Image (spheres, rainbow, N blue to C red):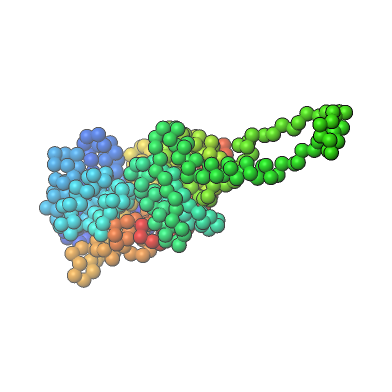
Amino acid sequence: MSTLAACAGGGEGTKTPHAGRNVGVLLPLTGNNARLGQEMLSAARMAMNTPTAPKLDIHDTAAPGGATAAAQAAVQAGDGIILGPLTAGDATQAAAVTTQAGLPMLSFTSDVSVARSDVWILGIAPEQQVRRMVGAAIRENRQHFAAFLPNTALGHAMGDALLQSCSEHGLQSPQIMYHGTTPAEITAQIKTLSAYDSRAASAATQAAAAAPVEAPPAGVDPANPESTPADPVPAPTSQPADASPLPPPPFDALLLADTGLQLGHVIEGLRVAQVSPSQIRIMGPGLWGAFAGKLAQLHNAWYAAPDPASRQHFVQLFMAQYHHMPTPLADLSYDAAALVKALDQVPPASGARNGYSLPALTRNEGFSGVDGVFGFTANGRTRRDLAIFQILPEGGSQMVQAPSGRLQNGTN
């Protein structure tokens, strides 16, 4: 496996060992995302800061003509591979140009709809997270999956990933519900998904069957119940049917994808429907890591994300050079540039235009990156080695399953 560490530094490489293998970089360097684009460019320069690294051919996707013009300029310059663009929209526009030119692209989006045989997505996609959690849940003997998801692009990506993962493991198709936005809608739909009414009815029936037969008051002759008791006693009071815990829902793992205020509505709906994180394995998006301290009510829930310890060296290098903490997206541009630099040291295979061939990019062992091991598949997906984090009772999270040290199997 190739280690992609690079020394800190600035500026593009000054020498290319293979002619015609300059690297196109497509990022927003002006406009609303200029600060982020410039930081990602800085990370790419860090990775390329060796005398033999290929030269970066930089184009601004926020300039007139957008990503299309930027990609056309890269093609005209004879670049061997493209790093970027940042967003799914820009990647789609650029891909229309680069695909026709046979130019591979390593895009920084996580939108799997962009992926194709010559366009790879480096962002941590929902399907990577879901596959990791489903596999771990199966290993703890969970077999019945369901999902309660927002009717958004993220929600549908998570739902599609759950369907695919369950199919790959030979499980029954999960029940997936895309919910509304109001608290009333969310609670009602959670009750439906969790079979609340039938569970409540079952609990009431069990409670009635278990209730002791009421004996006649003291002093009453059972053969003559109308007689006056010598020492009447009050009738016992009964608990309401919904005071007792309900049976568990018809699933033992539940995938969520909400964040923010709407996640609060979902948590309240789960409480009302008596769907408890202590009964089932709740799973959510890696986005939860940013506000895990506020998720105490979802204690025991999981999310999948890179092990933060794996990026500490990169963070130290970046801060020493640029004096501020890098964003997670800077990880992607550093990894992409370091990967290209590593491949650039390998002579092109016989008959190949350059060293960035499909076999080279999709090698089984993958590459070592800032956030752990990653690799590419032939259909444009990225495989990643993610950790699993669990929400603590007091809020916050801890890593409960470290990265495996190997890439996930499958198509993503």
Towards the viewer: 140 or 203: 203
> What residue do we see at 88% from left, 28% from top?
230
Q: Which residue is nearer to you in this view: 197 or 23?
A: 197
Residue visible at 18% across and 64% down in the picture: 353
Question: In this picture, is 261 found above or below 197?
Answer: above
Residue 308, image x, y percentages: 45, 46
In the rendered image, which quarter contains the N terminus?
Answer: bottom left
Count of marks overlaid on the render = 0
> In the image shown, does 156 or 19 lie closer to the viewer?
156
Query: Is residue 24 rendered to the left or right of residue 394?
Result: left
Across and down, in percent, residue 299 comes to 55, 41
Q: Position of residue 318 (x, y in %)?
A: 36, 43
Q: Is residue 106 left or right of residue 251?
A: left
Quadrant position of the C terminus in the picture: bottom left
Q: Residue at x 50, y 34 (%)?
A: 268
In the displayed orientation, state which residue is furthest to the left. 76
> Farthest residue toward the bottom?
350
Residue nearest the viewer, comparing 179 with 112: 179
- Say whether residue 379 is left or right of residue 57: right
Q: Is residue 94 visible?
A: yes
The image quadrant of residue 141 is: bottom right
From the top left corner, tell me how far across and down residue 82 is, in percent.
22, 52
Inspect this view and state whether residue 328 appears. no
Q: Residue at x 58, y 42 (%)?
A: 201
Position of 181 with respect to 139 (left or right) is: left
**Quarter occupied by residue 21:** bottom left
